[in-house]
Image: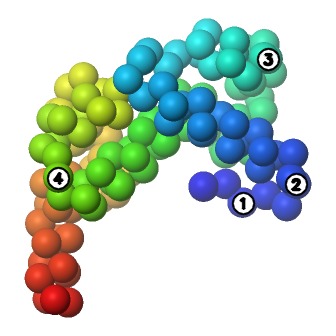
Amino acid sequence: MVESHNKTDQEFIKKFTDIVEGNMDSDVNIRFLTERMNMSQSTLYRRVKVLTNMSINKFVRKIRLQNAERLLRKEKYSISEIAFMIGMCDSKYLSRCFKDEYGQTPTHYVRCIKKVTHISV
């Protein structure tokens, strides 16, 4: 996700990502993250911004969307189920965010996966 030559930075991003992924079903907000990362809000914000060039909320959303993408690849869940699984209560919001990140809606993404899978089989 983030390329850094500094092992400390990589560990920080891994810990942050693990916290978000481990709590997808709960409200992962700034306060929750500052408590888990044992940092002040301003320090956490600065560190995330420097390492990812994103705000905390955008980085959390990116982690959620990467998990949505993994779940879509499995072709086992509906988009509504995936939205719930990654902590987005609204499938329309997931679709909008997914399109912003990946350039296509989740539905179109799944169709493309099926085409590629069907062709390669």
Q: Nearer the viewer, mark 1 or mark 4?
A: 4
Residue in the picture at 12% in, 66% down: 111
Q: Secondary structure at mark 2?
A: loop
Residue 95 x, y percent position in the rendering: 21, 42
Asked whether residue 35 is in view, the answer is yes
First in sequence: mark 1 or mark 4? 1
Q: Type of residue at label 1? A: Glu
Q: Which residue is mark 1?
A: 3
- Above or below 93: residue 118: below
Residue 44 x, y percent position in the rendering: 74, 24
Q: Are marks 1 and 4 in contact (CB under 8 Å)?
A: no
First in sequence: mark 4 or mark 2? 2
Q: Are marks 2 and 1 in contact (CB under 8 Å)?
A: no
Q: Which residue is mark 4?
A: 76
Q: CA distance from mark 2 to mark 1?
A: 9 Å
Q: Type of residue at label 3? A: Met
Q: CA distance from mark 3 to mark 1?
A: 22 Å
Q: CA distance from mark 4 to mark 2?
A: 37 Å
Q: CA distance from mark 1 to mark 4?
A: 31 Å
Q: Secondary structure at mark 1?
A: loop
Q: Which residue is mark 3?
A: 39
Q: Type of residue at label 2? A: Asn
Residue in the picture at 60% in, 37% down: 18
Q: Nearer the viewer, mark 3 or mark 4?
A: 4
Label placed on residue 6: 2
First in sequence: mark 3 or mark 1? 1
Label placed on residue 80: none
Quarter that holds the N terminus = bottom right
Q: Type of residue at label 4? A: Lys
Residue in the picture at 48% in, 25% down: 23
Q: Which quadrant holds residue 43?
A: top right
Q: In the rendered view, does 80 fall on the left or right side of 104?
A: left
